[in-house]
Image (cartoon, rainbow, N blue to C red):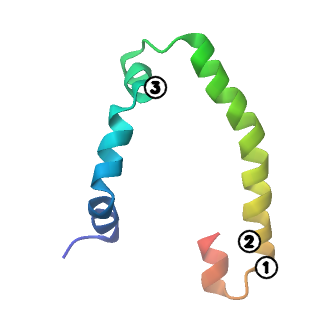
Amino acid sequence: MNSLCDSLRADCESLWQALHRHPFIRELAAGTLAPERFRFFLEQDIFFLPELARAVGLGVAKAGSERELAHF
């Protein structure tokens, strides 16, 4: 029997492979990513992460069961 992780990974194998072929990821892994491109990536995270935290916080606050709470 496959684990849940194995099953989910198999379901999105083509996407997984495409992500690993993306130039940003390849350059990051090779250590050749231009610093300004990495900085742009980090700057985008500065905008995204607080909103993600708020969304997760809302999920926690509105969880109607222990199972839902554990999800968040």
Question: x, y (%) of residue 20?
Answer: 34, 36
Q: Are marks 3 and 2 in contact (CB under 8 Å)?
A: no
Residue type pointed to by label 3: Phe
Crowd class of label 3 (few under 14; some 14 to 19; many from 20; radius 10 Å)? some
Q: Are marks 1 and 2 in contact (CB under 8 Å)?
A: yes
- For residue 37, the mark is none
Question: Real-space Cα distance between discs 3 and 2?
Answer: 32 Å
Question: Real-space Cα distance between discs 1 and 3?
Answer: 37 Å
Question: x, y (%) of residue 19?
Answer: 38, 40
- For residue 24, the mark is 3
Question: Residue drawn 78% across and 47% down?
Answer: 50
- Name the mark nearer the viewer: 3 or 2: 3
User: In screen coordinates, is 15 left or right of 1?
Assistant: right
- Looking at the rendered structure, the secondary structure element under dot 1 is helix
Question: Residue drawn 28% across and 70% down?
Answer: 3
Question: Residue drawn 72% across and 43% down?
Answer: 48
- For residue 59, the mark is 2
- For residue 62, the mark is 1
Question: x, y (%) of residue 41?
Answer: 62, 28
Question: x, y (%) of residue 2?
Answer: 22, 71
Task: Please state, as top left, top right, bottom left or bottom right, where the C terminus lies in the image.
Answer: bottom right
Question: Residue drawn 73% across and 87% down?
Answer: 64
User: Would you identify the image quadrant in which residue 53 lies?
Assistant: bottom right
- Looking at the rendered structure, the secondary structure element under dot 2 is helix
Residue type pointed to by label 1: Lys
